Amino acid sequence: PSLARRRVRPSTTAALAEPLMPARRAVSGSLRGISVSQAGQPEVAARRVSSLNDGEALLGFSSGLCSGRCFLYWLIFLSCLGGLLFGYDTGVISGASLLLKERFRLGAVELEAVVSSTILFAALGSLASGPINMRLGRRPTILLGSATFTLGALLMAASASFGTLVLGRVIVGVAVGLSSGTVPMFIAEVAPTAMRGKLVALNNVCIVSGQVLAGLVDGSFALVPAGWRYMLGLAAVPAVVQLVGMAFMPESPRWLLEQGRRGEARAAMLRSRERTPTCEAEVESEIAEMAAAITLQREAEAALRRATVPIRPVDEGGGGGGGG
């Protein structure tokens, strides 16, 4: 009887109930059905993202070792490696050019081609990043940029001729363009509203950090035989890290919503949110605002297309033509 009258402390009850909270179930590796049981809110089920489960288990995400804020920071770190590579590949050539000029007997025009080819094709790559992002998504575009960075860095490091060196610089330039046009947008779309500004600014910090790192690497290998190979080839290291890590990251929630995949967008957003009792309600609110913005954008684009008046040729018999 005394045991029956014993009251359970609220803290103990919360500790026992915590593993059963819907927010905990939302970020588990299976991402099975999730329901919001608060008054006035409908039940919403999140679609299982099965293609990422194996990778998440290897990296510890589905087991709870890295979730919520930890997962968000890891995601931002992997994304910002694109900015680091941007700064490194545009800055490393300043020190490597001295060794390249001596190794390949480069004249002024050839040296300018080596230096400027990356900048030229970075501009072209940034223009191409828009259609690629719209069609494939943000994550595949970042993966494509990582693979291109890796290929270009290895090709430059193994160059035996001027043509191969320029080709490697061109490939790296395309990767720089893809990265610069995608990473800031991806970070802005996955970051919580309250943290969006400072997380997007981290990409700019990484660009400058990459330039500083390039200067340090140039100084470290300036007197090493064939040191230019190390200078140009070391860019493959962060590129491979980004390539492997981003393969297990979720897609941008906004892009998923644009494709009509609301359940996957909700599941991706829940994985990067801090676990609170109001987490699911806040995510639903963000998704509703995002969906409304997408609808408004499409309506504005449709109205603009309808308002566009086609240009017709002027009738030869109309006034305005002076006769002889």
Image (cartoon, rainbow, N blue to C red):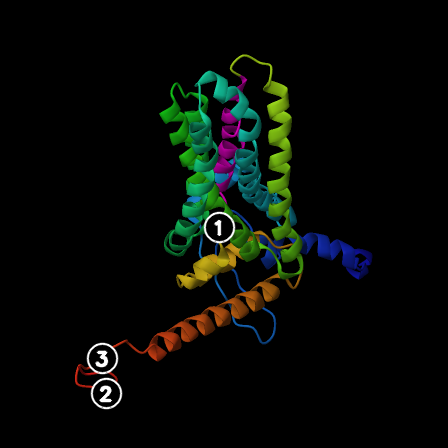
Looking at the rendering, which quadrant does residue 208 occupy? top right
Residue at 53%, 65% (x, y): give it.
287
Hey, what amino acid is under mark 2? Gly
Q: Magenta stretch containing residue 63, yes or no?
A: no
When asked about the image quadrant of residue 289, the answer is bottom right
Q: Which residues are magenta?
A: 227-251
- Judged left or right of residue 191, residue 124 is left
Q: Gap in Å between the C-alphas at discs 3 and 2?
A: 10 Å
Name the spot of residue 111 as percent of width and height, x first: 46, 28
Q: Quadrant of residue 194?
A: bottom right
Towards the viewer: 112 or 322 = 322
Q: In this image, 2 relative to 266: left or right?
A: right
> Is the residue under label 1 in contact with that under label 3 (CB below 8 Å)?
no
Whether tag 3 and tag 2 are in contact, CB under 8 A, the answer is no
| Mark 3 lies on residue | 314
Task: Select label 3 or label 1 by which is in front.
Answer: 3
Which residue carries the number 2 mark? 319
Which x, y percent locates residue 272?
59, 52
- The residue that label 1 is drawn on is 181
The secondary element bearing badge 3 is classed as: loop
Circle 2 Cα neighbour tier, 10 Å, few/some/many (<14 / 14–19 / ≥20): few
- Discs 3/2, front: 2
- Name the N-terminal-most of marks 3 and 2: 3
Residue type indicated by callout 3: Val
Report the amino acid beneath label 1.
Gly
Identify which residue, 78 or 307, lies in the foreground.
307
Residues packed near mark 3 inside 10 Å, few (<14), some (14 to 19) or many (20 plus): few
Question: How far is disc 2 from disc 1 in space, using C-alphas?
Answer: 49 Å
